[in-house]
Amino acid sequence: GTAVVISPLIALMEDQVNALVQLGVNAAVLNSSLDGEQQAAVLRRLHAGDLDLLYVSPERILSNGMLARLEELPIALFAIDEAHCVSQWGHDFRPEYRQLSVLAERFPGTPRLALTATADQPTREEIIEQLRLQQAQVFLSSFDRPNIRYRVEDRDNPTIQLRNALDRHPGESAIIYCGSRQRCEKVAAQLNAKGISALPYHAGMASEERRRNQQRFIYDEVSVMVATIAFGMGIDKPDVRLVVHLDLPRSLEGYYQETGRAGRDGLPAEACMIWGLADVVLQRRWIDQSEASEERKRLERSKLDQLLAYAETVSCRRQVLLQAFGESHAGACGNCDNCLQPPQTWDATEAARMALSAAYRTGQRFGAQYLIKVLRGADDERIRSNGHDRLPTFGVGADLDERTWRGLMRQLVSLNLLEPDAEAMGGLRLCQAARPVLRGEQQLQLRQQTAAKRSKKSSSKERAALDLSGEALERFEAVRAERANLAREQGVPAYVIFHDSTLQTMAVQCPRDLDELAAVPGVGAVKLERYGQAFLDALHGGQVHA
């Protein structure tokens, strides 16, 4: 029979079907991107038993006509992809997913499979409950992505910090996540002005423009996509070498999902987050002022605290990240910024007491920037008019620079010693946990702040993802060019033909004939027959014959 794959996005379905067809699998997609004649052709293949895999959206399968049609056919399996969408507490909730429980009623004898790469324990329990999979086996593999290098930076000079990240991956595919539509447009324009090809993607754009920009990124016509989280699950591009968050994501679960778009081919990749206190203030305000229930607000605050703990940790980041999914990591990972360059800490106890005192004495209604000016004794008309230049805390922190104070304020918020007051427009007020610090009963060792400096640009030959040199690098470029030509001829993304990891192995092993090429991971029987000779010729300058 036919396996029906339920997938949430048109782009994701089309991407996977393209890859399956290349492998010789009888697969098709049925969605609104097809015209009436094309949809009729797919349905004819379905009824003729010509399809191994049929991809449909939740909305399409839930229509009475589609369910009735499937009941007449031998359906071998229902595979529900991106199953975390069923969780109303998750980062990507889609109401239609909850209605998929109808499959248990109408197809009681047909196997059902729910799949996701991003689900903590509560989300996994919700998937089982909502999709009525209580009797199903659970297969849980590791959440660890050892090829991704995690890096978190305090927002100092985001323009320089972003350029440094891109310079570590010259000419390679990158996704930059921004918190707002306006910021997406601005960052994309700035990158293009600097000669880096970039396109924006956000929900405020016309759907056709979004689709076109996404296709240009997938087909390697541009190297950088600057997007809100609207740019998400539809991306299965395996050769993304860099994911940057220019603003704090909503949760550690969402962060894991978004960074997981890097390095899907298994080659080295980087996830870099650049954030600041303003992000925390905005998110706390968004949570507190939302119309959600108090239970939901408590959950959202807890998720934000979990994310801040990850951002501010001085220990191995991978350990903190995996712990959120109930998984431990033995020892330091050796592939995050804290492992590679252990951060310096300092005794911030007295400085913290000054900051907490300043917040209290000014009425717990001013933000970090104002408090820093009070602590540093700034000549400021607003401070004078409020009479805060006469406070005991005025000027007591003049020996610390603004960057140090900014980092301290952010860490006090992440430690729940200070919290933004939504009703006071982000004014910082003391939490209960601040009392022992103020009384001198608790010591604080905090991360030292460092300034962002422009790094020297890497050579285009210094590929961060590929450990190749000399003749192997030349062979890699040759097979990469051959792949690009074939992709253009067929109108498919280059990675649909072969992943970079497959090309890298070809370049290193340099197979001499089709038998040796068949042993390269990623070269199956169908692709060997279709492309084998072309890639042997590319490896050997056209001098090899089968």
Image (tube, helix red, strand yellow):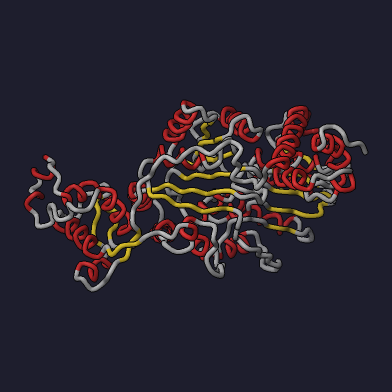
Where residue 375 sits: x, y (%)? Answer: 17, 52
Which quarter shows the C terminus? top right
Instruction: Answer with the quarter of the image where residue 217 lies.
Output: top right
Residue at (31, 62) in percent of width and height: 346
Q: Which of 349 and 38 is in front in this view?
A: 349
Instruction: Answer with the quarter of the image where residue 469 lies.
Output: top right
Look at the picture and state if 91 lies above or below 246.
below
Residue at (60, 45) in percent of width and height: 233
Q: Which of 473 and 227 is in front in this view?
A: 473
User: Is residue 402 rendered to the left or right of residue 464?
Assistant: left
Spot the residue most to the front: 470
Look at the picture and state if 359 lies above or below 217.
below
Q: Nearer the viewer, residue 325 or 166?
A: 166
Residue 298 seen in this snapshot: yes
User: Is residue 167 rendered to the left or right of residue 247?
Assistant: right
User: Is residue 153 rendered to the left or right of residue 473?
Assistant: left
